Amino acid sequence: MKTRAVEVTVGAFVALGLAFLAWMAITVSGLDFSPADDEYRVSARFSNIAGLKPRAKVTSAGVTVGRVDEIALDPELGMAVVTLALNGKFDQFPLDTTASILTSGLLGEKYIGLRMGAEFDYLIDGDEIVDTQSSLVLEELIGRFLLSGSDD
Amino acid sequence: MINVLAALGRTTLSRLAGLGRAFFILAQAVFRPTGAGASIRLLWPEIYSAGVLSLVIVAVSGLFIGMVLALQGYSILVDFGSEQSLGQLVSLTLLRELGPVVTALLFAGRAGSAMTAEIGLMKATEQLASLSMLGVDPVQRVVAPRFWAGVISMPLLAIVFSSLGILGGHLVGVDWLGVDAGAYWGNMQASVDFRVDVLNGLIKAFVFGIFVTWIAVYQGMDLIPTAEGISRATTRTVVYGSLAVLALDFFLTAMMFGDY
């Protein structure tokens, strides 16, 4: 095998691999090379987030508007502090927006649903959503049902 | 009793000495490269024989594994009415697991065994000894280019494998079984993350490349220079290489995707 021919075939091999990698990035993983939309962060306190994970969706009326960025515990209040990274395109959430933890389908993953309020001022970076609704925990639900039954 | 202890000690010592020689070869191949120009010239033919010549078997296997995945996945998914997520199943399986692992197994069998046999024959015909007498370090001249060629080729081959597998899945799923093309690609794009899935798969392929080639060149350098020794060392390359790939895959998967 002549050196020249070897170099050409090796070059073609490397180019083929890189071309497939680029194809993979664009077609398979849908990588977006346009600069990332700026995000803004708001926090929300929940008494129970059971099952919510970082990177979970944040939706409003079913439309994905952001993701869960960080989950921490507030040791003083014993509540979970969830930081939401919301897409800068959706910057018109009123201050009294409600955040609730929902489940997609019967067995699906947990996500956060935002329901818009009626205030005229909008949430900005660093704000906190005050009105929250925690996830339903089956055991608590059954416990409450049993307790209310014994009252009768 | 003393004899048993002595045998045990002898085995342990020889194993440890072998491990030491293996690390020594790795360190020499990695940290003492020859002059940049010379090593690049030595690298091309090795990438050709390790990478380009493995391309056909890797491409064909990738295509068929993608097709089988689509066929098997479809027959299960259709029961739940969720054959729309076929693209997700095929692409995630290939990118995260089958692409790097099967490519590395094929690579150990196709390129690793050839490396061991080649270096072994050089040793048996005393070419390595002649190199040393000429003042040329055989590790730098023979081992280092082969090692780097393997490390460079493996990720490229794994990309080709996964890509052709996804295209094969499209062939069976969309063109034959009638899954909607938009759903195939759309669900795939929604669930595959470039950093988590594609890059982690590449990191796996890179690590497998290091270990398979390392085992191959070590077995070649360390064999008993007879016909029987070469055949044994070639077998060991494939066996140890495959076992190393499968065991490493578990640990890498646990590190990359195991944080639940």
Image: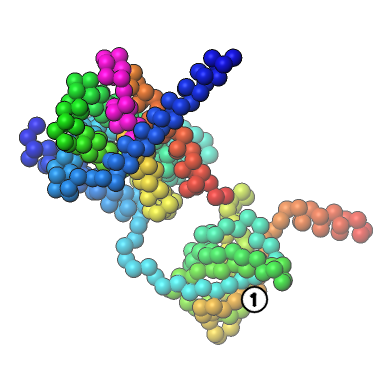
Left or right, A126 with respect to B136, comes to: right
Label 1 sits on a secondary structure element that is: loop
At x 51%, y 23%, the residue is: B9
Q: Which residue is mark 1?
A: A130
- Give the x, y percent position of residue A112: 58, 63
SS assignment for the magenta stretch, majority: helix
| Closer-to-camera residue (B27/B213) | B27
The kind of residue on which mark 1 rests is: Val
> Can residue B69 be seen in the rendering of this structure?
no
At x 26%, y 29%, the residue is: B115
Query: Would residue A81 be counted in the magenta stretch?
Result: no
Q: Taking A126 as reference, is B97 above or below it?
A: above
- Give the x, y percent position of residue A82: 59, 67
- Give the x, y percent position of residue A113: 58, 65
Which residues are the magenta region? B214-231
At x 42%, y 39%, the residue is: B97
Q: Taking A30 as reference, is B252 above or below it?
A: above
- Give the x, y percent position of residue B253: 48, 43
At x 57%, y 16%, the residue is: B2
Q: Taking B39 as reference, is A67 above or below it?
A: below
